[in-house]
Image (spheres, rainbow, N blue to C red):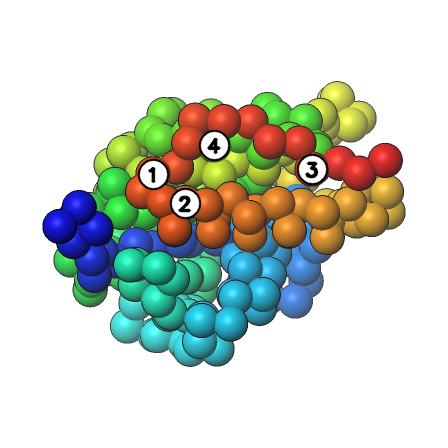
């Protein structure tokens, strides 16, 4: 009977970013990079399908006892909440059923921090999500800091592409995020944790 509690539970895993080739490999699009990798590496997930009414690209599959809805908003970053809200409404889900993958300038590159809830820390995509669905969703926060040069505007820095050295580490980052998602999807909750993915 114990296992019947979570049967047929549906969860949303949303990667945040800006649509369009010009944003590929930019720091702000690391959420797209990681969710793409997860879908590609997980045999149970379908190919991406554009859902115009939901303002998102969607891939679905079953992992363990969970129906998984992976999504990438087709809005720009600062309107991400519209897409996540639309998908959540479609599947009749609450914020506790949602995990979001996004860049975090206040965390150094090489670290991933996991938590539930919290403020936006100035991130426009997270600000939009919290306005549309509240703050009680899971977050996989991928460090893209520190900003350099320090005087550069934050919005300019996150829209730059990862440096060459950083790009060498991206496969390790994507593997680690896929592992985190697998732990979460085959378990029951996102741990409050910090992970390091740099391989020297």
Give the alpha-carbon distance from disc 2 to disc 3, as whole Å.
18 Å
Front position among marks 2 and 4: 2
Give the alpha-carbon distance from disc 1 to disc 4, as whole Å.
11 Å
The percent coordinates of residue 157 (x first, y second) are 70, 37
Q: Say the numbered circle drawn on residue 197.
A: 3
Q: Mark 4 sits on what residue?
A: 114
Give the alpha-carbon distance from disc 2 to disc 4, as whole Å.
11 Å
Q: Say the numbered circle drawn on residue 189.
A: 1
Q: Mark 2 sits on what residue?
A: 184
The percent coordinates of residue 100 (x first, y second) are 42, 45
* As drawn, 3 above or below 165: below
The residue sitting at 78% across, 27% down in the picture is 148
Q: Are marks 1 and 2 in contact (CB under 8 Å)?
A: yes
**Which mark is first along the chain, 4 or 1?**
4
Which residue is nearer to you in this view: 31 or 75?
A: 31
The percent coordinates of residue 95 (x first, y second) are 25, 43
């Amino acid at each position: 009977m114990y296992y019947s509690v979570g049967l047929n539970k549906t969860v949303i895993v949303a990667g945040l970013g800006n649509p369009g080739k010009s944003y590929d490999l930019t720091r702000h699009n690391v959420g797209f990079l990681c969710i793409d990798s997860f879908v590609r590496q997980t045999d149970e997930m379908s190919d991406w399908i554009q859902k115009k009414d939901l303002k998102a690209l969607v891939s679905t599959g079953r992992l363990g006892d969970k129906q998984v809805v992976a999504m990438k908003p087709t809005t720009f970053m600062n309107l991400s909440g519209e897409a996540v809200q639309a998908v959540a409404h479609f599947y009749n889900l609450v914020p506790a059923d949602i995990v979001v993958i996004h860049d975090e300038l206040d965390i150094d590159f090489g670290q991933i921090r996991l938590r539930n809830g919290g403020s936006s820390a100035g991130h426009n995509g997270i600000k939009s999500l919290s306005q549309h669905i509240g703050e009680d969703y899971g977050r996989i926060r991928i460090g893209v800091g520190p900003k350099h040069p320090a005087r550069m505007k934050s919005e300019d820095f996150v829209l730059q592409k990862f440096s060459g050295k950083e790009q060498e580490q991206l496969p390790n980052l994507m593997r680690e995020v896929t592992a985190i998602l697998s732990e979460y999807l085959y378990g029951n909750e996102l741990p409050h944790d910090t992970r390091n993915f740099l391989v020297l």
